[in-house]
């Protein structure tokens, strides 16, 4: 049995409440709670068909299908006797179709559509990122008991019982055997007001490109710090991934940073009673980390710090207990995320911009990514750049839920088709047919050199990470050296740049890529340069040169 679910906008919710025969929103949520409790008693079935509930006012309950999955989603389709049904049939006196399909999980408590937020877990290897993400999924009911039991058994069989929550996201044999994340895992959970997409980034320095791909989609970064003696120092020292991940997240456009100091219940730092967390260790880490974050560009109002225990679940959904953590009285991680207010840098941008993160072939070509701007609908005909081919969106899903339209910030999987459609590349852009976005091969940019092994001169080669694309490139000209703080020109046409320099450069890309000046579209105008396995520089685009027809 299948069901198609579409998102319900605020206007639809208002239409429901204004319809004379409609039930109140509170009664709808009461029925949802009743069905959820029945669903929890039937976790052993992949699909569960509930019998019809009694009619509510002049409504008839047309279909009630809880879909048992990792999200345990729940949808209801109500049909009003005074309105046209979704299939076009009328019941009772006819009228306008003011509500098509109601997805209760798309509505917040006040009846408005829930906002969506992408969060990415970053930090040094073995800090506890996957364990924390998996424990959040378990505590919010986003993983059913059967799946969690399988993860626990697999961890026990491997002699790694403490990894049971990490196995919720580390699903491949390679990741479970090595005990480290290799690709950016993805999962979903939601609260009363927000729907979250979790991106679990790998912490090993060999997988930094995967981390950058995840950070390019994220709104909020969750920097996991291990409070265990020696582990924080290893990650924070030069060469550790704590520093690099914090810098890359800022450069990729992550708007807020939540610093979670984990493992404060470890025997190496816990107080003599064996239970109370160490305030001195918490403050020691905080005092070393915050000055670095400020130097990396994070403003104090955009950074929040809290103590947690990922394995025990302390501080994740509810604040840590006062007996264990007497020095912290603030909110939990989920409460902090629920109350974050995110700025929209490209609020005036109306064109559809959908950078492709990955693609694969089923019946149609499936592509995944984040909708950066515009409103995308099923049936839209879009242009794929840099190829310039036209494609059609046949199906659109977000977290297992079918959508008719999506709004900026949604992480989506699209099923697409088109004439002479080549295999999609990571970093391709889907946009409107009449969009002015173009592919470029040359651009002028401002670089902040962070960690160059050698001096940078004309002819320097690196790999550019811009939105979801990875492009080999060459710096062919240095046009000006700038003051690091004021940005004023210090010297024209310098011969080289070194670590700590801020310079204007001209860059030649190995193949055409979509880019725009940072002041026009920030998401398409910021980038990172990597060489020799290290992040060499971060930059913003000033001007671009269009691709010639001959190219």
Image (cartoon, rainbow, N blue to C red):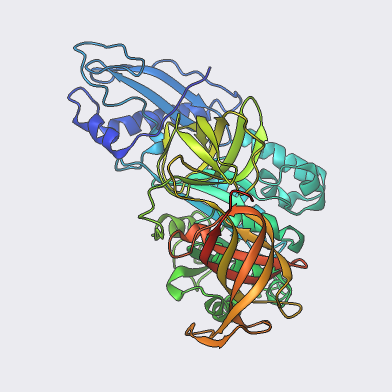
Side of 165 relative to 336 (left or right) = right
| Quadrant assignment, res 206 | bottom right
Q: Position of residue 381 (x, y in %)?
A: 47, 33
Q: Residue at x 82, y 46 (%)?
A: 158
Number of numbered discs on residues: 0
Q: Nearer the viewer, residue 437 or 349?
A: 437
Q: Position of residue 127 (x, y in %)?
A: 68, 63
Side of 419 relative to 460 (left or right) = left
Question: In this picture, is 159 found above or below 14?
Answer: below
Q: Position of residue 84 (x, y in %)?
A: 27, 17
| Quadrant assignment, res 475 | bottom right
Q: Residue at x 64, y 40 (%)?
A: 424
Q: Residue at x 26, y 11 (%)?
A: 91
| Quadrant assignment, res 203 | bottom right
Residue 313 in sight from this viewpoint: no
Q: Position of residue 8 (x, y in %)?
A: 35, 34
Question: In this picture, is 453 found above or below 87?
Answer: below
Question: In this picture, is 104 found above or below 22?
Answer: below
Side of 457 relative to 370 (left or right) = right
Residue 416 in sight from this viewpoint: yes
- Which residue, as the protein is rendered here, is positioned at the far bottom? 490
């Amino acid at each position: 049995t299948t069901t198609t679910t579409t998102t319900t906008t605020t206007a639809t919710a208002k239409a429901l409440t204004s319809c004379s025969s409609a039930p109140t929103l509170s009664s709808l949520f009461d029925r949802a709670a009743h069905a959820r409790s029945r669903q929890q008693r039937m976790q052993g079935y992949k699909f569960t068909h509930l019998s019809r509930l009694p009619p509510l006012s002049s409504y008839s309950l047309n279909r009630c299908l809880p879909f048992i999955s990792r999200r345990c989603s729940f949808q209801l389709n109500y049909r009003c006797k005074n309105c046209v049904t979704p299939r076009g049939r009328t019941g009772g006196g006819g009228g306008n179709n003011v509500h098509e399909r109601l997805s209760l999980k798309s509505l917040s408590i006040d009846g408005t559509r829930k906002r969506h937020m992408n969060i990415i877990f970053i930090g040094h290897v073995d800090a506890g990122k996957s364990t924390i993400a998996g424990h959040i999924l378990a505590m919010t009911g986003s993983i059913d008991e059967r799946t969690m039991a399988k993860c626990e058994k697999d961890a026990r069989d491997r002699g790694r019982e403490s990894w049971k929550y990490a196995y919720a996201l580390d699903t491949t044999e390679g990741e479970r055997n090595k005990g480290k994340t290799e690709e950016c895992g993805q999962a979903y959970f939601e609260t009363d007001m927000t729907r979250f997409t979790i991106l679990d980034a790998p912490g090993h320095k060999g997988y930094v490109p995967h981390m950058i791909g995840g950070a390019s989609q994220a709104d909020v970064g969750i920097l996991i710090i291990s409070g265990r003696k020696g582990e924080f120092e290893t990650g924070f020292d030069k060469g550790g991934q704590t520093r690099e991940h914090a810098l890359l997240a800022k450069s990729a456009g992550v708007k807020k940073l939540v610093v979670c100091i984990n493992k404060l219940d470890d025997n190496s730092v816990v107080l003599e009673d064996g239970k109370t967390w160490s305030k001195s260790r918490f403050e020691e880490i905080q005092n070393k980390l915050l000055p670095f974050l400020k130097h990396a560009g994070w403003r104090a109002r955009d950074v929040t710090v809290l103590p947690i225990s990922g394995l025990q679940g302390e501080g994740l959904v509810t604040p840590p207990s006062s007996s264990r953590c007497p020095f912290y009285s603030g909110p939990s991680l989920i409460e902090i995320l629920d109350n974050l207010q995110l700025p929209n840098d490209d609020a005036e941008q109306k064109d559809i911009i959908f950078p492709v993160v990955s693609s694969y072939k089923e019946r149609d070509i499936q592509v995944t990514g984040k909708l950066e701007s515009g409103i995308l609908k099923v049936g839209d005909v879009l242009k794929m750049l840099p190829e310039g081919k036209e494609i059609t969106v046949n199906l659109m899903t977000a977290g297992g839920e079918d959508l008719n339209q999506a709004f900026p910030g949604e992480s989506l999987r699209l099923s697409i088709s088109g004439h002479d459609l080549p295999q999609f590349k990571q970093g391709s852009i889907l946009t409107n047919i009449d969009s002015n976005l173009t592919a470029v091969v040359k651009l002028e940019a401002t670089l902040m050199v962070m960690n160059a092994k050698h001096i940078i001169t004309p002819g320097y080669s690196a790999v550019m990470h811009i939105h979801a694309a990875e492009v080999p490139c060459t710096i062919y000209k240095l046009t000006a050296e700038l003051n690091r703080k004021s940005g004023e020109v210090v010297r024209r046409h310098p011969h080289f740049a070194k670590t700590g320099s801020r310079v204007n450069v001209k860059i030649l890309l190995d193949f055409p890529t979509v880019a725009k000046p940072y002041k026009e579209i920030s998401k398409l105008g910021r980038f990172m340069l990597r060489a020799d396995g290290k992040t060499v520089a971060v930059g913003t685009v000033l001007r671009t040169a269009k691709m010639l027809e001959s190219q």
